[in-house]
Image: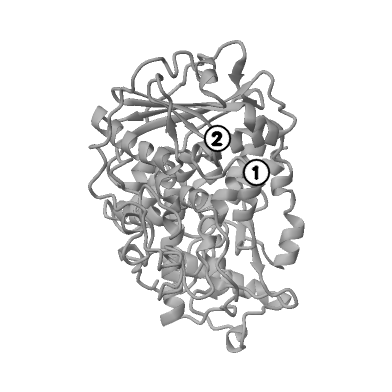
Amino acid sequence: MNSRRTRTVAVLLAVAALLVLAASGAVPGLLSAGPIGETTETDRADEPTTEGTVGYVEGYWYDDELAVDERDGAVVEDDELEAVVYRSMARVEEIRGLTFEDDVPVEVVSREEFEADNDDLFADVEGDERIQLNVNAEALFAVDRETDATEAQEALYGGTVGGYYEPATNQVVLVSDSAEAPELDEVVLGHELLHALQDQQFDLSSYDRETVDQDNAKNGLIEGDAVRVETAYEQRCDAAWDCLEPADAAGDPPDVNWVLYATIFQPYSDGPDYVDHLSEQGEDWDAVDAAYDDPPASSSEVIRPGEGREPADIDVEDRSNESWSPLEVDGEPATESYGEAGLVAMFAGDAHDSNEPSVIGPDAFFETDLGGYDYDQPYTDGWAGDELVTYVADDADTDDPAAAADRAGYVWETEWTSSDEAEQFLAGYQELLDLQDAEPVDDRQDTYVVDEAYPGAYYVDHDGETVTIVNAPSVEELPAVDDGAAPEGEDTIEVDDVGPEANDGGETSDEDDSIPGFGAPTAVVAAAITIAIATAARARSSR
């Protein structure tokens, strides 16, 4: 996997749980701890050791009292940090039932320091990779032609990071909004220490994470585990433990690209239930631990735990003519797989915006308790695989990613478990084109033109269990990108009566100008920056 793409995708995944913060409420976010969070306290050993005793680290038990507990606020002096970290490590062990093998250095920095030190996370995303990101974001109807996708991702990253674990140095960095005297959020610390514990026990860097869907699949296990531990940690802070908690940060809800957000939030929404399902297969955390040797292969496995659906092996055939060719990034064709979660996001991202219609509306997408999103949708639950290949014309100015987007296109092949499931997806995609004011092209089969935010020509082909979408700057260039696309003739796809009855559409009352999810009665504590940024750190260190 090339290092530049790794950093970009990693940062996006990292911010997924962080954006749930709001001034007075929350976006659908973390779920309650559930059965696996109901752990019992460890009996104290007469001669405890850091390596062999759960809940005890370097002389500190999980329920020890510290002098810093008695102070107002959550400012920790340098000579107090070690004790706070060791106690938090012991608390993570107490909940998770595993012991740390090594120390985990922890640093607390102000947001200004963090932003100054991490400006390069997106600075190196240039050239062909930036072109691919622009094309992919347009394919999802997430980022329009006038907006740079990398900048949209950077805005998503924004000022919401609470901390991160960096496996290259085995270090946790916590980010505080208090510049003068940085404060420590102990629940965020616990979340990041859990990632350090996972890495020490299960070697998280060993996983294949070459696509968005692979990232979401692995994070379903990793973040489902972390969210369960974090939530149990927070519950004990409320009930039994003295914990450091900074003052609530004031401010407006973040300006979020909701399609991108929904694409990467799925592990946090479905991961806890996936981990609960695993816990029911064995005693305590045993089945969860075993799953790290055989992690989910797709987001579908996390959306519907126990189904075990292996994704189809798709290799899109290059059928372009001499004027077009697949874009290459680091010498390889630029391909992506968004998986079931990404396709749901494409259909449901605008459900947050009461001013925008959406294929999957808020009633269908938001869980009733605002605990997360419902990614199990009739339009997409028959997903079996997908591959999106970016193409560029020979006359594209690849030195200028913005200009290159005008001479780019894609072939997106999707596989479904049956022809009927393929038709369900077609119904959703047809509605999505309608929402973009797509105009059918006379005398061309199943071909459409969009003139506004996502300009270009679109050809949709349905062949049994396969649905293929071809995009090009013009109708005439569709067969240049994929030979045989947009043939002459009448439309062959009829989906008017196929759409799922459960879909509530996206039409919302003009009188309601709120964003669904904000103003929720229960505030959700944002998870700290996740293991995904660890992938970015590995990429930096390997260059």
The picture quadrant where one finds residue 320 is: top right
Task: Determine the CA span between mark 2 and mark 1.
Answer: 15 Å
Q: How many marks?
A: 2
Q: Position of residue 227 (x, y in %)?
A: 44, 61
The picture quadrant where one finds residue 84 is: bottom right
Chosen colour scheme: one colour
Q: Are marks 2 and 1 in contact (CB under 8 Å)?
A: no
Q: Which amino acid lies under the numbered mark 1 shown in the image of this protein?
A: Asp
Q: Determine which residue is flagged by label 1.
A: 148
Would you say 42 lies left or right of 388 here?
left
- Answer few, some or many: residues within 10 Å of disc 1's Cα (few below 14, many 20 plus, some between 14 and 19): many
The picture quadrant where one finds residue 294 is: top left
Q: Determine which residue is flagged by label 2.
A: 455
Q: Using the rendered image of the protein, determine whether residue 267 is visible from the camera's viewpoint.
A: no
Q: Position of residue 255 (x, y in %)?
A: 57, 60
Compare residues 71 and 362 and report the one nearer the observer.
362
User: Residue at 69% across / 20% down in the picture?
Assistant: 395
User: Residue at 60% across / 18% down in the picture?
Assistant: 325
Q: Position of residue 81 (x, y in %)?
A: 66, 73
Q: Is residue 227 above or below residue 207?
A: below
Q: In terms of secondary structure, where does tag 1 sit?
A: loop
